[in-house]
Amino acid sequence: MVADADRVRRELEGIVGPRRVSVRPGDLDTYARDMWPRLLLARRAGVAPTMLPTAVVWPETVREVAAIVRMARNLGVPIIPYGGGSGVCGGVVPRFGGITIDTKRMAALRGIRTSDQVVDVEAGLSGERFERELTRRGYTFGNFPSSIYCSTVGGWLATRAAGQLSTKYGKVEDRVAGLTLVTGTGEVVDTDGPRRAIGGPDWTQLVLGSEGTLGIITSARLRLSPAPQLKLFRGFEVPNVAAGVEALRRVLQRGLKPAVVRLYDELDTFVNSFGDHHYDPDAAAWGHTHAPVPLPGEGALPPLPPPPRPTDDDGPLERLLGMVRKTRRGLRGDAFTAVLDRPRLVNRVVGTVAEKIARKGCKLIIGLEGARLRTEVEAALTFAELERAGARDLGEEPGRAWLARRYAVSYKMSPVFRDGAFVDTMEVATSWATLLDLYHSVRAALGKHAVVMAHFSHAYPEGCSIYFTFAAHAPDQAASERLYDQLWKDGLEAATRVGATISHHHGVGMLRAPYMAGEHREAMAILTALKRSFDPDDIMNPGKLGLAARRWEAR
Amino acid sequence: MTVALEAALAAVVGADHVRPIPGQPALAVTPGSPTELADVVRLTADAGAAIVPVGAGFRAARVRGLGERRRVHLSSERLDQVVQLDETSMLCHAQAGLTGAALEKILAPRGLSLGDYPPGILGSSLGGLIGVRTPGKSSARHGFFEEAVAGVSAVLADGRTIHTRVAPRRSTGPDLARALCGSEGTIGYITAAVLRLHRRPEARLLAAYVLPSVDAAIAAAFLALREECAPAGLRIVDATEARLHFPEAGLADGQALVVAATAGPTDLAACDRDLIASAVAAEGGAVADLGLAERWWRRRLGTEPTPEPGPTFQASAGPGQLTAAYHAVRRAVPAARLHVSRFDLDGAVLFATLVDASGDPLVGDALTATVARAEAAATAAGAWLLGARPTALDPYLKALRAELDPRGVMNPGALTEG
């Protein structure tokens, strides 16, 4: 246990006053976790978290953050930065206790410099509010993760997040002109040399993705694009995954930059049932329609959809399970868990069924947006290239359906967590030359234990990421956790074996920490040296990113 | 220089590849493989000497502050192989001693290219292109040269070799390759890199315009860029420079010549050309003789000589500072010939050829004094000078170097203050 809690609270109160510090059990419990599914397993089982922060604090200025870090350094207490809590890797879990700094009260959009097309924004601003504010002023940052309603700008930067339109706008690390952070020594530094400055390493790129282990990002200067004048979304059909991958590669390598590319494998195509899920006017009622120009004041963001009803059977996974239920009459009783207990069978059955029913092949959603003239030209070239590669044009309908429901998926997750069942996603990436190898290897590794489907999104001229969704079941919490860990071990090791990266945009946290050595090998020496230079006392989010935390583990 | 180190290095790389540098406590060493290079680093470190990286050619290396410390000028020139060319992923794994130009020759028959970076920079070795950041190494279509780096291999001070893993993007901590990019050999000695390639453009279209002022030309350039135009080259030439370089344009005082190249699939190249034309029209400009642009392009490729040696001063500025920086330099050095190029959404680079009253390029003390005047003016207007760098993070760089290189072996004179 770290320095006594009362002392920590008093010191914090000395910095921010009594109202922005909490040691209440309810708060500590809340800040003990993020959306890491492994933690949800325990939560479902009614198990209280074992790793709790000592205190939670809500600073409002970078100066307060610096004072807190200096104080923590003096007392020898860890600091854990906390944004929206939407992470899925346990990055905010206070492994060794300490002070959780919630950044959400530092949420100002300080200003847009129109001449340079950049915005200065504080780290705690929610993604949704950020993008809405920009839309009002005729800009977009272009990052639309499905977590946008519950994640912060700082969280995006700390993890190198990606959004649904990343193929055009880039991942967040491609959009940063500079950062302000408080390092582990309590010093405030700007990595805000202009990008054209010159000499020395690019510190911005060395801080992005550090997940709070080098310091805490308090604000950033981010690049903007003009709000799109035109959006063109289209569905295509390809005979199989390999043909789809080849079609995407040809588009990207011709120098074309669609905003959205999503190629669903046979199962994912079937489960998402684009064919029979027509554009729903009710969905339009919650705000978003396909539109040649952004809706006034809405931009790319629909208002938050209502929370799902627990009985809602509309999510892809529920549909996946329903489909399996229908085709395997033998699986009566609690079909939900019964299905998940027999993943190999299901994967095989689903393969056959998908083949039979989805003879049509794989769906491909492609969308372009941006300046009117260039978008029109790029869209024509893109659609023509896809057809040349053998893709069949399905018109705008599938694109609209995807657009209307694209934020809904995330909210379907937690109802699946029942009776020891769980679902998670694994996003890996590699070059085009090894992409199919990666797809088959990871799918086989996960398929031993779980029902698995995948889509390809976030494409680049040199490669692409694959987003696996897998569901599994075990009889009790302990068994679920063992199965969960085994799945990740098998999946990530399969990815490493083919030379892929183990994470495209979710980050490392606790989940991937054990696999960082395999990812970076000898280059971990540089990460370790960075850590020591920015945080000599190892107080910043210790025990994350695969960095040793000897100081704390010895206790 | 101790004979012992020379002998030890010769045993590793062969006697032909170790050579004392006359008048200096230094050896020039050219290892033939990354393994040899790692051994050289290890032996040099153990002998208490320093490593000074040397790229293509044997430029005056940066040995500032080294005094009489023994050093090894370590050249990558024999590491000049393409290790792997992955045409499916358009990635090229090449050794650091290969020059950009030599790599282009290998790529061209395959319809591939590094991209439309200024041809002038490609004479450098890949190690130098990646290891040293300068504002000119950029392209509006592909970004900064270091953004082409998908992975690097490097030897650290203790002789360990690291290879950063190649992936299109990743979320597994900071981008460790970026610790080496721009580090000028202080973090590690780059031995190879995996670079992103591009298809050779299906079409390239040239165009020239005359605008009423440099201000209007700059405004037009950013107007087009904001409409997502991504030119393969764009240059604004002011009247002073145009009079010598493009006399046939007949520019009046204050006017500006804009030459532009767009490239890519034909429709896209035409679209980008039209975007520039519209932006120029919106700023009151008019189409000029295409021959001007063709001449600019030939000079850019080096197939036609330029009327005078290259610029002697450069400064970069963001879109918001560029006009002011141009006028500040214009006022400070009235005789200078100026152009602005390397445009992207982050800004552009202002180049000046500093000349005397009769129009001859300045040299010696006169040049030094004039450069100082131009620098002061540019800095005051918010521009950044070549070689400038933000120093706020120097203590962290120092700590990082101390961690990786406690004996101060790796290019100790570089990236330090004073």
Image: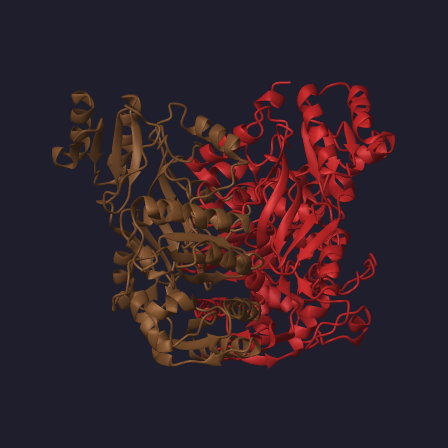
Chain colours: A red, B brown
Nearest the camera: A74 or B287? B287
Residue B407: % across, % down:
37, 23
A291 vs A463, left or right, is right
Residue at image position (38%, 81%) is B289
* Quadrant in which the C terminus of chain B is drawn: top left
Q: Residue furthest right?
A: A19
User: Is A132 or B71 nearer to us in this picture?
Assistant: B71
| Residue B7 drawn above or below residue B221 | above
Q: Is residue B176 visible?
A: yes
> Which residue ends up furthest to the front in the rendered image?
B357
Where is residue A358? Give x, y as percent. 59, 73
In this orientation, which residue lies closer to the viewer: A74 or B123?
B123
Residue B288, above or below A155: below
In the rendered view, does A383 fall on the left or right side of B311? right
In this rendering, position of residue A472 left or right of residue B134:
right
**Residue A14 vertical position relative to residue A175 in the rendered view, above or below:** above
* Quarter holding residue A145: bottom right
Please say whether residue B347 is visible from this viewpoint. no
Q: Which of the image's four quarters has the N terminus of chain B?
A: top left
Q: Whole-percent x and y of residue B65?
A: 35, 28
Residue that appears at 25% across and 68% down: B303
Picture quadrant of residue B334: bottom left
Image vertical order of residue B276 relative to residue A159, above or below: below
In this figure, what is the number of numbered marks? Answer: 0
Q: Quadrant of residue B287?
A: bottom left
